[in-house]
Image (cartoon, rainbow, N blue to C red):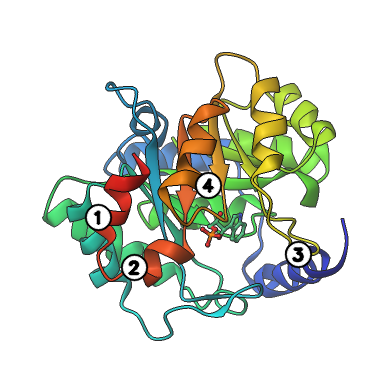
Amino acid sequence: MSDKLTEIMAWKRQEIAPDVRSVSLDELAQLHRALPSPPSFLQALRRSDDGLAVIAEIKRRSPSAGEIAAGASALTQAARYQSAGADCLSVLTDQKYFGGTLSDLEQVTASFRESPPAVPCLRKDFMVHPIQVRQAREAGASAILIIVRALTDEEIMTLHAAATAAGLDALFEIHSEAELERAVSHRAQIIGVNNRDLARFTTDLAISERLIPQFPREVVAISESGIHRAEDAARAKACGADAILVGESLMRAPDPTELLRSFR
Ligand SMILES: O=P(O)(O)OC[C@@H](O)[C@@H](O)c1c[nH]c2ccccc12
């Protein structure tokens, strides 16, 4: 791990420090029982028509792209994605680097409960502690992100167990064979290959083409980042991806419905 990801992880640990307290699996299970069940992220990724599932991301800015849609309303963007037929959403909740908030996620999931269909949402953030899993569940998320290279095996185990207790799916993000092996050893059901190197910000779809064919059969495979046009989605599909995760190009698209259809 190096550079930007190291910096972000260090910041994240500092940012959450005031909120950190011990969070038991029992507490999470109780919370899960008390709250309305979120729609299944895992199920939405397995389309019955065999088409590529699309996870549409709400992202105002990023360290690699700079400003993408400063000041965009998460609610408006979520409604556009919902009517465009997105299978799932990814909502960035990191403020400092991506311009998102937990409140964006809360508002979006509440709006889906009021005007179905409820699209399952991933809390996209740099998870290090179960308190963030609790926040995700309270905000109506269906899944959390586990960035394998940013965490020790013990941290991964803790976060994965917390997610399961809270009734959330976990998306394991990887960028190499060694990380794939680690994700599989944690019995990941959903694994995403980030085509972008989070340390250096170079993006290459060939990473998905190299790694996805090595996935165990039963794992749901996602190709993440750098997907801009139909040909990119076709490459992901051809190497065995069940789903793609797309941020920047959908945020910038004048008509996300058309772009999303072309991806499928
Ligand atoms: O905007 P893009 O290139 O379509 O990428 C989306 C998504 O994959 C990217 O935002 C991402 C992948 N992994 C992350 C981890 C943290 C923050 C962001 C990300």
Q: Which residue is mark 2?
A: 253
Res 88 seen here = yes
The disc label shown at residue 9, or none: 3
Q: Quadrant of the C terminus?
A: top left
Crowd tier of the residue under label 2, counting other residues whose Cα lies within 10 Å: few below 14, some 14–19, many 20 or above: few
The disc label shown at residue 144, or none: 4
Q: Residue at x 22, y 53 (%)?
A: 84
Percent coordinates x, y for residue 98 in the rendering = 56, 74
Say left or right for 168 vs 79: right
Q: Measure the C-alpha gap from mark 2 to mark 4.
A: 26 Å
Lower position in the chain sequence, tag 2 or tag 3: 3
The residue mark sitting in front, 3 or 1, is: 1
User: Going by the picture, which residue comes out furthest to the top?
Assistant: 217
Q: Amino acid at mark 4?
A: Ile
Res 166 seen here = no
**SS of the residue at dot 2?**
loop
Crowd tier of the residue under label 4, counting other residues whose Cα lies within 10 Å: few below 14, some 14–19, many 20 or above: many
Crowd tier of the residue under label 1, counting other residues whose Cα lies within 10 Å: few below 14, some 14–19, many 20 or above: few
Q: Is residue 56 above or below residue 53?
A: below
Q: Nearer the viewer, residue 263 or 194?
A: 263
Q: Which residue is mark 1?
A: 258
Q: Measure the C-alpha gap from mark 3 to mark 1.
A: 36 Å
Location of ligand 1 given as a quarter of the image: bottom right
Q: Nearer the viewer, residue 109 or 26?
A: 109
